[in-house]
Amino acid sequence: MKAQIVYDKPCRIRFRCGSDAFTKELERSIHKLVMSNPWAIACEAHYENGGILIRYKEGHRAEAVELVRKLRGSDLAPVSDNQYDTEEIDRTFKSDLAKLVMQRYIRKAILPAPIGAALIVYSGLKYIAKGVSALFDGKLTVEVLDGASISACLIQKNYNTAGTVMFLLSVSGLLEDYTRARTRAALTDSLAIKADQVWLAGRDADTLIPMSQLQVDDCIRVRTGSVIPVDGQITEGEAYINEASMTGEPLAVMKSAGASVFAGTVVEEGSVVIKVRKLSSDTKISKIIELIDNSENLKAGVQSKAERLADSIVPYSFLAFGLTLLFTRNVTKAVSVLMVDYSCAIKLSTPIAVISAIKEAADDDVTVKGGKYLEEYALADSIVFDKTGTLTNAEPVLEKVIALGDYSEAETLKIAACLEEHFPHSVARAIVKGAADRDIDHAEEHAEVQYIVAHGISTTLHGKRAIIGSRHFVCEDEGIEITDEQQAEIDEKSGACSVVYLAVGDKLTGALCISDPPRPEAEEAVKQLKEAGITNIVMLTGDSAKAAEITAQKLGISDFRAQVLPEDKHRYVQQLKEHGHRVIMVGDGINDAPALAAANVSVAMSDASDIAKETADITVRGADLTQLAAIRQLSEKLMHRINSNYRFILLFNSALLLSGAFGLLQPSASALLHNASTMAICAKSMTPLEDKKRKKKNK
């Protein structure tokens, strides 16, 4: 692309390509292309003059120049409208704010007084109409108060005060809209369905293919614990599918051949073949964002309380107006009282503070599905950890294979990897990777794989039943005999490793020893959580008591439960709640989903299974457990800010009311101070809760 360099300073360069170089639709495409490079810091593209501004890391000027030189409009594909552009939102906000300010002051400077007054009356009619509409609906809300105060100013021909009130209300509304839009943009990327590969169903065997190769009318197989990546129709099999992201219903529903399924829903149990109807869907994105925006259920309790309180105060504002008029017989003093209310600041500042906190969490790679979960996190006194894949290393390693039956170590590992490759769990990944590292080909030789919710997998191999899982599952649930000699050999060779048992044809075939060391930061994370006021820290695991005890000692956790089944985890969380505790549950596997759903607030880490992420209220997109303590600090600071806002609003507006009633402030001054304070408290609510410089230094 032909381009002229019009600005060139260290780490910042601006190109001018001409007004016909690219269209508005391609602005985002250029932004995305530039930002895909590791040296890029920021990029702005403007189709009006073909301008491209690139901020880059020191020493990478040549790469920026070369990228623009090779840029071709024909090579750029428009980015989907569902991909929100945060920089465009910022530009739109600045532009709209500038227009508001210019419009107000240019009108005052240029237009004759009668025309200016007429325009103010015209603008005021919109606010009055909203207030009248609310009254007809039988509601005495903030809209009624706004309409009444503007009406009072217009009746008194105090056009300047009316204009000031409307200007400040417009700016407050613009601030709230901007914060919501910015939050939506920050959340979208984390909520997008990012399936890189899918299993293409075939007659003889399934084939793993990149998502990019999938086409409409292809058939894919989706198994237990996986998110359905497309919209389509079931052609084979049946499964319990959790459609909470679509319907909000927490219970899974049975779906079989002929039923429609949608992207973003989760197969809780079973396996289905789906004929692809749509390759991409924004269902999950739009649904969750809609819930964040609108659902009363996801609002923080303090936010819902604030909104109810805001509307309930309005009648008292009118009562104060009436009493002031009655006792002073002074309309100006009464109108000064009407110009001030508590509800406007309360109703605006609280949701803005909550939304800003969610956005701040998103900036730190933490997805929060609603304000109420931050509130619960701040109030929690207990945290329950799953061990494997959560407290322990996100990538456990297969240390040893113990052959106990008619199969060799290589054959034992081949069978285990073949069974485990379909399931998104850290232990399963360790077994599959262990086979790959040993150059063992584990092409599918079995029939349909079934995940048993009691923590195990079963299938049929060469006519024989094959099962793999915990000792409890293999021995107690499936009745496979494990002799004392076999158990002694396993105990001796496994050490502190977790053990997965494999049986073929009703006989124990072998055991796989998984080394699962704690994450490097896990001990520090536990320490920080204790310092943050979490008094009860518990570790639950399906592993042996020996492995659990060693891990708990390393991390400084005094309370742990070993050989725990999924239903036991769920029951334990329920018991804690029944004893008055507020519980945070942190898990990563399919078997953690019931406990995650039962907790007051649940957290999934980045490498968790799809169903754990879907069930969890908060998802940490990184792998650092110390983020859990950071979320605690953020949530506590949010609650402190909201309560601090309440105190300021109460004191400041009470002072304005008294000043207006005693004639110390004119209506215009009351309106200005009230609305300015509302704007100030909203602007303060948008500021970061965490000191970014200090946080960066600590890192």
Image: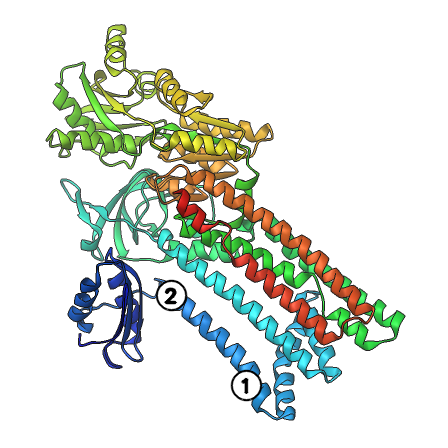
Marks counted in the figure total 2
163 to the left or right of 372: right
Q: Return the mark for residue 292.
A: none
Q: Which amino acid type is shown beneath numbered disc 1?
A: Ile
The percent position of residue 63, horizontal first and vertical second, equals: 18, 62
Distance between the alpha carbons at the discs numbered 2 and 1? 28 Å
Mark 1 Cα shell of 10 Å, populated few (<14), some (14-19), many (≥20): few
- Quadrant location of the N terminus in the rendered image: bottom left
Q: Please name the residue that numbered disc 2 is placed on.
A: 87
Q: Please name the residue that numbered disc 1 is placed on.
A: 106
Q: Can residue 612 be seen in this snapshot?
A: yes
Kindly indicate the quadrant of the structure image that contains residue 25: bottom left
Q: Nearer the viewer, residue 595 or 637?
A: 637
Q: Nearer the viewer, residue 439 or 510?
A: 439
Element marked by disc 2? helix
The percent position of residue 324, horizontal first and vertical second, equals: 84, 69
- Quadrant location of the C terminus in the rendered image: top left
Mark 2 Cα shell of 10 Å, populated few (<14), some (14-19), many (≥20): some
